Amino acid sequence: MSLPDKYFDDLYEESTDPWQLGSRWYERRKYAITMALLPDERYRHAFEPGCSVGVLTELLSARCDHVTATDIAEAALGHADTRLRQRGRHETVTLLQRSFDMPWPAADFDLVMISEIAYYFDAATLRATLDRELPRLGSNVTVVAAHWRHPVADYPLSGDDANAIIGATAGLCRVGGYRDDDVVIDVFDNGSAQSVAARTEVPGAQ
């Protein structure tokens, strides 16, 4: 079970940016924290399902050789394309219309950004999607789970529940995170639990 496609289509009919991702300080701060938590300085190919209007997509494009971003809403992808083109970022981003629980569009991702999307699915669908898709990826993949913590009546899962399900995926090791009253962000790796200092050989790190 997941929220119907029409739920999102209706949101974008009412507003070009329903969650004010491009203007609200809360969102800009959250994205800054999310990007700062990434354990690697650079990534080869990022996957961002549920990209909405492309605010986080733009930030990812500065840290990744390529970004594949998806959304179920055609209008969202149109706004994301416009944003990326205006900022000269469109050439390294592929935008696709598809849902997170569909087969993922590639198997070479080394960064999976699950930001504000997992709670749109019930626990069984989320579990099945992760168990099917994550094993297809290589080793040393960073998986980020970032979700709103306050209750939303429409959503099948809470943000905390969504992150807990992602964190329970076989093979994932938690390497960092952030939590406050509003948002929970967890960072996982499927190859190593080493800290950033240890993996970059900072003297004294264990």
Image (cartoon, helix red, strand yellow):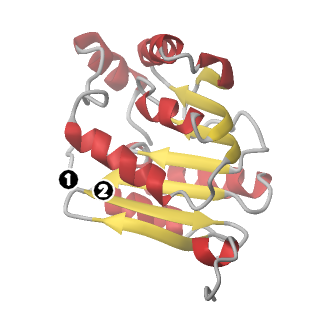
What is the crowding at mark 2: few (fewer than 14 residues within 10 Å), some, or many (at least 20)? many
Left or right of 7, for residue 123: right
Reply above or below: 168 against 155.
below
Q: Position of residue 110 (x, y in %)?
A: 71, 50
Mark 2–mark 1 Cα distance, whole angstroms, equals 6 Å
Residue 130 placement, left or right of 31: right
Residue 78 located left or right of residue 107? left
Residue 191: image location, x then y, percent: 73, 69
Residue receiving disc 2: 158
At numbered mark 1, what does the secondary structure look like: helix, strand or loop?
Answer: loop
Look at label 1 and name its amino acid: Pro
Residue in the image at 43% along x and 39% along y: 2
Would you say the residues marked 2 and 1 are in contact, meaning their CB atoms lie under 8 Å apart? yes
Q: Count residues near mark 1 (Cα–Cα under 10 Å), then give few for <14, some for 14-19, many for 20+.
A: few
Q: Residue at x 52, y 52 (%)?
A: 126
Total count of labels? 2
Image spot of residue 1 (x, y percent) = 44, 42
Residue 75, above or below 7: above
Would residue 138 be found to the left or right of residue 112 on screen? right
Please report the residue visible at 22 percent of the width from the left and 43 percent of the height from the top.
Answer: 26
Q: Which element is circle 2 on?
A: loop
Name the residue that disc number 1 marks. Answer: 151
Residue 160 screen position, x and y as percent: 33, 63
The C terminus is located in which quarter? bottom right
Q: Choose top left, top right, bottom left or bottom right for residue 142.
A: bottom right
Q: Residue at x 29, y 21 (%)?
A: 17
Q: Quadrant of residue 154?
A: top left
In the image shown, does 197 or 65 lie closer to the viewer?
A: 197
* Residue type at numbered disc 2: Ser
